[in-house]
Amino acid sequence: MRVEITEPTPSLQRTSGQLIHLEQRRSSLALEDTPVVLEADEVEVFYGSFRAVRGVSMKIHKNQITAFIGPSGCGKTTVLRAFNRMHDVIPGARVGGRVRYRGFDLYAHDVSATEVRRRIGMVFQKPNPFPKSIYDNIAFGPRANGITSKAQLDEIVEKSLRAAALWDEVKDRLRTSALGMSGGQQQRLCIARTIAVEPEVVLMDEPCSALDPIATARIEELMRQLKDQFTIVIVTHNMQQAARVSDRTAFFTVEVDGANDQRCGTLVEYDATAKIFANPSDERTENYITGRFG
Amino acid sequence: MLADAPLEPGALRRQASWRATKSAIMTSLMIAAVIVVAVPLIAVVWSVISRGAGVAASSFPDFFTREIPVVSRRAGPGMGPAILGTLLVTAGATVIAVPLGVLGAVYLHEYGAASRFARIVRFMATVMTGVPSIVMGLFVYLTWTMTFGYSAFGGALALACLMLPVVIGSTEQMLRLVPTTLREAAYALGSTKSRTILTVVLPAALPGIVSGALLAIARAAGETAPLLFAVGAATRYNPDLLHDANTALSVQIFGNATSSFAAAQDRAWGAALTLMIVAFLITFAARVFTARFALKR
Amino acid sequence: MRLDLRGPDQLRIPTIVAGLAVLGAGVALTALAAGGPLGVLAWFPILAGLVVAARGTGADRAFRWTAIAAAGIVLLVLGVIALVMIDRASPVLGKMGLAFFTSSRWSAPDAVYGALPFIWGTLYTAAIAVVLSVPISLGVALFITQVAPRWLKKPMVYLIDLLAVVPSVVFGLWGVLVLSHHFGLGRSFLTAGIILGIMITPIITSLAREVIETTPASDKEAALALGCTRWEMITATVLPHSKGGLVGAVMLGLGRAMGETIAAALVIGSALGQITLDPFAPGNSMPAVIANEWGEADDMHKSALIALAVTLFVITIAVNLIATTIVQRSMRRSRGA
């Protein structure tokens, strides 16, 4: 399926720099429809009786980067966490609708949350390495999943650190504490830790928001490299980042129910990134992209 | 206006006024309070060291190894059995109370959260911290000692009951300090809840848990009342945990304090010195732990 | 493609049954061997049975149940304490009725037990202790938090904690041999009150310090910026803010003073207890009586002492509960939760 790219309108001049870059990339390769890995079907999330998000239906495709954008409080992180059953740890949280991974309902009653999370990993907003050595951080996931042989663990640690572009920097101090690294390094460690269990999908919740621009650029480069092996879904409040990095973008917004002053997040538009930024179908999307609000 | 008038040479100098004087008086009262607090501490420590060191040093190392004279007016050293007794009873209490207390706190913080059972347990643990030690002593007497006789194990049980709520409270506090995001990271990697607790949460909170436990142990080592009813008053070494009466430093101090014989009183001071050194060492270790390893608040 | 998303959390019934069977066998063995050397061997099947049953339920679930059991032990112990003590106290309460708490005659040979003098002694010495200790504790807490230069704060906190660690029996020893003997203060309500006061000072000071430190710095700075002296700033911001917590801290110290056995027993005088306001009179308190008279008591006497213990328990618990609620509520309010 080829994506038509229209002329950038004057109101989109601000992002046109990235769009041209995008256009060059997109026009040379077709956005093939890879198989669907994750599917959301009318998903809604409740905290107690408060509905935080509603009406989310989307398909995440394999080996692509999907970005969730939108103003704060619109539920992007809430939806992301529903994909790997992280809401289970919050008492009173409930997920309605269906979330399917390769066709299997993730919330079926005999499905184990730990098995789900082994296949769908998550990187968090603020780097959260364990107060252990670098080696033990990476080895934690494999050990938790039953791998005990030192040789195997050594191999996994090296492979993951190389994939996260961190190996050369830390190979001589694998046994030192992970807390002694800079913020950017810690986040790359967290990414290495996540891919060490070889998940199929990696969810990233604003992974660069706590980092400086240089560290951010390195992580974005890392994401492009990882795309070949993994499927990535990233929540970001930085539109330019979404435009730079993602293949598809989903725009969420907050709806205020005037009657009882309830705020609820919802999915507005979900399409190829180029289309969202160049020619969004919904007016709310356009307003957000052009900075009229949010 | 104030701003218009020229600034006189001494205008900004501190005024002598009733308000300033009153504040200074209050500050000196506070300093006086500090001195008043320091006085008994120094007095007690001084008495113990001066009188206790005399006995312990003059017959070193006999004081720590010889048995207690059966006839108390006889001069001479010997608190060996009491030292062993204190060690046995305290170690026994620690082995019972610390694992139970840590596990209980793990339940309260990691699993129970707001459930009714957890709230009741937490409430009861607070109630239990206020049980007078003599009540615990009587309880152990009525249940254990009357069935099985005096033994170090009975003493250990009594002390464990006193330590348990304290360990639960301090451990729960430490668990609360572990950031939730660490747990989330572990779950996101496919780790089960029990594994997360054992390999991430407890290791992270360990220094605080250890120092809390050490403080509870230090307090337990000094307890007297429960031991009076559980342990008896032996004068010979008894390394058997489960059978026969035993003794402890605190029990000896209590018994000898009311004696009119100088020799017995001397031994009491020696025992007091030993006990205080033990308690201070444990507390010091606890502080070192907190300072070097604890989670930054 | 068949994807198995079910995890290691599944129940394996046969394993559980096998484990429980082995456990049962172990318990039976213990009962049969009863104390002899074989009894020790019985621990192996018991432990093995537990482990197998645990693996059958899944490690995760087993751990959870172990933690629940540990927490439940608190309830179990407290429950048993309450039951046993009340059961043993009932004979004397049956005999004396409410007069146990109201009459003043306590005579073991005549089997007449009136606890009032001891209740009075406990309350009176605790009151003396609190009256002596509160101004000091407050002064020290204020000093540490408001006056002391930064380098002095930590050593001061250490000093206070050291006081808390000195075993109470050592205080008692010092009290009886130094205070009452050497300085001739004798055994009286006052001596006991002084010792108890020294013992509860670190508790009240630590708690008071914590509460005072929650006073928002902005409030204090505002007072100072208006030209208040240090004392005026304290009375205007710190004290009103910490009022509740300070009251709670004092009550907690009161609870400790009432329950303290040994130090009191050594210096209070163990007279048969008079109800008098004279602080220099010798008296008696509940814990001291129990400690001193237990050794040679007959059954009814023991029952009376147990009833005393229960009374002490109830009063101390009540005071502690009130104190904890007050402290918690004031901490919660001041943190703006």
Image (cartoon, coloured by chain):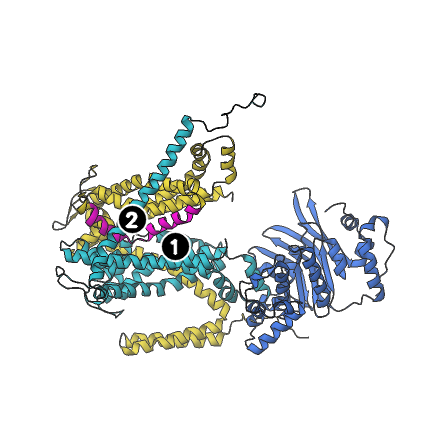
Chain colours: A blue, B cyan, C yellow
Mark 1 residue element? helix
- In percent of width and height, residue C159 lies at 36, 49
Which of the two marks, 2 or 1, is nearer to us in this view?
Answer: 2
Q: Which residue is mark 1?
A: B125
Residue B157 lies in the magenta stretch = no
Q: Of the residues shown, which amino acid type is indicated by label 1? A: Ala
Above or below — where is A60 with respect to A8? below
Q: Which residue is mark 2?
A: B42
- In percent of width and height, residue B84 lies at 26, 66
Which residue is at the far front?
A: B9
- In percent of width and height, residue C135 lies at 34, 38
Q: In the rendered image, is residue A208 in sight?
A: yes
Q: Of the residues shown, which amino acid type is indicated by label 2? A: Ile
Residue C25 left/right relative to A162 = left
Measure the C-alpha gap from mark 2 to mark 1: 34 Å
Above or below — where is A201 with respect to B36? below
Residue C192 or residue A119, whichever sits in front: C192
Write the start and end of the magenta stretch as one range.
C151-179
Above or below — where is C152 with respect to A119? above
Residue B61 or residue C35, whichever sits in front: B61
Q: Residues within 10 Å of mark 1 (few under 14, many from 20)?
A: many
Mark 2 residue element? helix
Residue B25 left/right relative to C174 = right
- In percent of width and height, residue A184 lies at 64, 60
Q: Residues within 10 Å of mark 2 (few under 14, many from 20)?
A: few
Which chain does the numbered disc 1 sit on? B
